Image (cartoon, grey):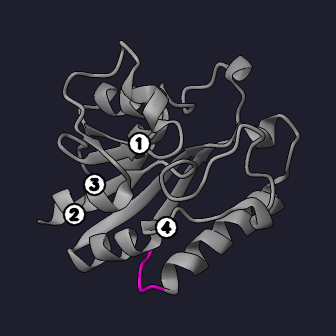
């Protein structure tokens, strides 16, 4: 099974320091929905792994998060793409859970649900915590420069094994070539 794991905010859609709190605030990064469709056409299952501490902070509720995700799924479907599953952590950093990236719990749950090991599975993110979680489970971290990616690229803790791409479309082009 070919699997790829994507972060949401800053990879698929534009990010906001004020959080994406409603479906209206969710705006796709140009080319990202088409890149997901291209992954599907190449035989990849696409899973989203996203920290959503806005739930834990009380900025939005689960119904709103579900509505945001429904908009994302619909937008991607309109160009022939499909998200196989969405995994999220609703906790804040203060909750000390095991599922909030950079901890590996969410990625370990994906491995369990898909009955696979994540070695060499691409994990595409824009923040250091996405990449650190990938390395913790032996997956292949890939950085995109959208979202927080430009800042992340300069972080001295960036894993040395991380290839860097301008955006999701460029990362996908490399994966499916």
| Front label number (3 vs 4) | 4
Q: Are marks 1 and 3 in contact (CB under 8 Å)?
A: no
Label 3 vs label 4: CA separation?
Answer: 14 Å
On the image, which quarter does residue 100 sit in?
Answer: top right
Measured as percent of width and height from the top left, residue 59 is found at 87, 43
Image mark for residue 145: 1
145 lies above or below 41:
above
Q: Earlier in the sequence, mark 1 or mark 3?
A: 1
Residue at the far top: name it. 156
Q: Is residue 83 visible?
A: no
Pointer 4 local density, CA inside 10 Å: few below 14, some 14–19, many at least 20: some
User: Disc 4 on helix, strand or loop?
Assistant: loop
Q: Are marks 3 and 4 in contact (CB under 8 Å)?
A: no
Image mark for residue 171: 3
130 horizontally vs 164: left or right: right
Give the quarter of the figure containing the C terminus: bottom left
User: Disc 2 on helix, strand or loop?
Assistant: helix
Measured as percent of width and height from the top left, residue 53 is found at 72, 37
Measured as percent of width and height from the top left, residue 15 is found at 63, 47
Q: Is residue 70 visible?
A: yes
Q: Earlier in the sequence, mark 3 or mark 4?
A: 4
Label 2 vs label 4: CA separation?
Answer: 15 Å
Q: Which residues are magenta?
A: 79-83
User: Which residue is the site of mark 4?
Assistant: 30
Label 3 vs label 2: CA separation?
Answer: 5 Å
Q: Are marks 3 and 2 in contact (CB under 8 Å)?
A: yes
User: Which residue is the site of mark 2?
Assistant: 173
Q: Earlier in the sequence, mark 2 or mark 4?
A: 4
| Front label number (2 vs 4) | 4
């Amino acid at each position: 099974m070919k699997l790829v794991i994507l972060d949401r905010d800053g990879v698929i859609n534009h990010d906001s320091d004020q959080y994406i709190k409603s479906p209206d605030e969710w705006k796709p990064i140009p080319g990202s929905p088409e890149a997901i469709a291209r992954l599907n056409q190449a035989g990849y299952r696409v899973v989203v792994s996203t920290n959503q501490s806005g739930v834990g902070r009380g900025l939005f509720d689960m119904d709103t998060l579900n509505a945001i995700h429904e908009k994302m799924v619909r937008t991607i479907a309109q160009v022939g793409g499909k998200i196989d599953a969405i995994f999220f952590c609703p906790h804040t950093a203060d909750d000390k859970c095991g599922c909030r990236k950079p901890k590996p719990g969410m990625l370990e749950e994906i491995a369990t649900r898909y009955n696979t090991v994540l070695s060499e599975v691409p994990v595409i993110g824009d923040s250091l915590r996405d990449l650190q979680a990938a390395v913790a489970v032996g997956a292949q971290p890939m950085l995109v420069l959208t979202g927080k990616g430009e800042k992340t690229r300069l972080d001295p803790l960036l894993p040395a094994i991380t290839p860097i791409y301008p955006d999701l479309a460029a990362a996908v082009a490399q994966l499916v070539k």
